[in-house]
Image (cartoon, rainbow, N blue to C red):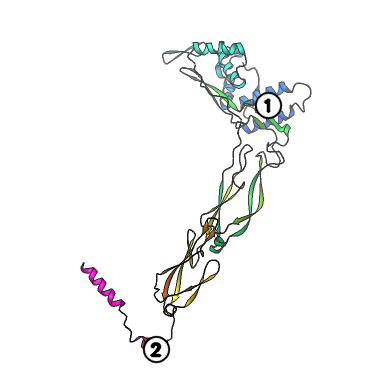
């Protein structure tokens, strides 16, 4: 027979949803809280509420309760009396043990084997004399603080800012532990209650019937996520999450010599943690825009430098613009296109060292008027240019090899 009406205990009907059951439990738990109920009956009433809540929130127990009047099914008879000690299964006798032994296993999984005489004798003897087995699962530990995940944010800067360094101001979101509830998630300390499902252990024991006996498993309590407590009234600021998101003004320092793909860490600006754990970090990934003239190779800067044919002929001194300032170089008449000149110490400056500016000459013909071209042609008439003839001969020779 049904000894208690769990629906009446919580004040809900048989078709109540999990949400309605949970809501009813929270209201009654606040009503019968020891701080509010001073007549000495609080413990008894809370025990009844917890028992009813545990059964009605467990689909299997609720189904057994609705069908048989007991959350343990047809074997859950009052007084611990169970079915016959032996059952026939597939032509094989399997010793199932008494229901009182099963109940003791469940009780001990929550509260430990504190009945000194029984834990060392009757319980162990029962296991050795039957075919039942038990997994060596341990009680689930309380939640440890979990650090939040790291995140990444891409920022594009100019070539010049990367070389010389700069500062960038940003407004970024940051997760912080709620100062209002001190990261408890509850509106007040009175709004924190022991989880009725696991009774504060953070874990739930289940005993499964197998052809070889009973097998006990212990898993994290799904009602409290292993914390062993439930929030009756969530914090009005963090809504029970224990974290709040704030917008912070941040100055990101880009050091001189920053290269494309470099990362800058912003501590605590990543994803929020769990169970009071600190937030992760944000990594700012630098993307350096390409420059029209300069290219970077490590700490060296490469420059494709156009130089006038006349400057080469006259061996003039020309001005070269570096990433930081200007410098001068003396040309020689022997220089040709492709000649690389190295300006030591004119490359990237960073904490890793200083690079060079490597100039690749590209000889170009200056713009002349038609008259000037004619005058130059007449002036150069006595001189013979054998470059083309030499090239033709070399090509012919290589073709015959």
Disc 2 target residue = 375
- Numbered range of the magenta stretch: 380-401
CA gap, disc 2 to disc 1? 111 Å
Q: Residue furthest right?
A: 38
Q: Is residue 348 left or right of residue 49?
A: left
Residue 219 quadrant: top right
Disc 1 target residue = 10
Which sits in the foreground, 398 or 153?
398
Q: Could you tell me which secondary element the residue under label 1 belongs to?
A: helix
Task: Say if the magenta span includes residue 14.
Answer: no
Residue 169: where, in percent of width, then height?
63, 57
Q: Mark 2 or mark 1: name the one nearer the start of the chain.
A: 1
Q: Could you tell me which secondary element the residue under label 2 belongs to?
A: helix
Residue 176: where, in percent of width, then height?
66, 44
Figure check: 100 above or below 351: above
Please state which of the two labelled residues, at mark 2 or mark 1, is closer to the viewer.
2
Residue 107 quadrant: top right
In the picture, the quarter occupied by the N terminus is: top right
* Other residues around mark 1 within 10 Å, as few (<14) / some (14–19) / many (≥20): many
In the picture, the quarter occupied by the C terminus is: bottom left
Q: Residue furthest left?
A: 400
* Other residues around mark 2 within 10 Å, as few (<14) / some (14–19) / many (≥20): few
Magenta region, main secondary structure: helix
Residue 366: where, in percent of width, then height?
44, 80
Task: Say if the magenta span includes residue 396.
Answer: yes
Which sits in the foreground, 177 or 209?
177
Q: Is residue 89 visible?
A: yes
Q: Which residue is pictured at 71% across the width and 33% down the height?
A: 191
Q: Which residue is pictured at 26% across the width and 71% down the height?
A: 395
What's the mark number on residue 65? none
């Amino acid at each position: 027979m049904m000894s208690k009406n769990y629906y009446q205990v919580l004040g809900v009907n048989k078709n109540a949803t999990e949400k309605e059951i949970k809501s009813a439990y929270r209201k009654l738990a606040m009503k019968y809280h020891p701080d509010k109920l001073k007549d000495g009956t609080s413990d008894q009433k809370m025990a009844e509420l917890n028992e009813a809540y545990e059964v009605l929130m467990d689909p299997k127990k609720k189904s057994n309760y609705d069908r048989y009047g007991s959350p343990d099914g047809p074997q859950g008879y009052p007084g611990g009396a169970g079915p016959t000690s032996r059952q026939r299964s597939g032509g094989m006798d399997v010793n199932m043990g008494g229901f009182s032994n099963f109940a003791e296993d469940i009780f001990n999984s929550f509260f430990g084997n504190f009945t000194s005489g029984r834990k060392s004798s009757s319980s162990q003897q029962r296991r050795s004399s039957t075919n039942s087995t038990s997994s060596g699962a341990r009680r689930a530990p309380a939640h440890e603080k979990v650090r939040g995940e790291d995140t990444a944010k891409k920022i594009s800067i100019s070539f010049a800012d990367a070389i010389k360094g700069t500062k960038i101001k940003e407004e970024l979101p940051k997760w912080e532990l709620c100062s209002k509830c001190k990261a408890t998630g509850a509106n007040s300390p009175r709004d924190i209650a022991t989880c009725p499902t696991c009774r504060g252990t953070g874990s739930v024991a289940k005993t499964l019937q197998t052809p070889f006996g009973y097998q006990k498993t212990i898993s994290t309590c799904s009602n409290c996520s292993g914390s062993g407590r439930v929030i009756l009234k969530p914090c009005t600021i963090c809504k029970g999450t224990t974290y709040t998101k704030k917008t912070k003004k941040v100055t990101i320092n880009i050091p001189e010599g920053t290269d494309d793909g470099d990362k800058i860490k912003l501590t605590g600006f990543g994803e929020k943690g769990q169970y009071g754990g600190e937030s992760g970090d944000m990594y700012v990934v630098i993307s350096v825009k390409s420059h029209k003239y300069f290219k970077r190779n490590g700490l060296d800067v490469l420059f494709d430098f156009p130089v006038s044919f006349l400057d080469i002929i006259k061996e003039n001194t020309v001005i070269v613009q570096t990433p930081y300032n200007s410098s001068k170089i003396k040309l020689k008449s022997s220089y040709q296109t492709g000649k690389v000149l190295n300006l030591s110490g004119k490359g990237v400056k960073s904490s890793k060292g200083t690079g060079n500016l490597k100039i690749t000459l590209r000889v170009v013909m200056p713009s002349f008027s038609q008259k000037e071209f004619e005058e130059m042609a007449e002036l150069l008439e006595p001189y013979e240019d054998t470059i083309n003839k030499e090239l033709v001969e070399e090509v012919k020779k290589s073709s015959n090899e």
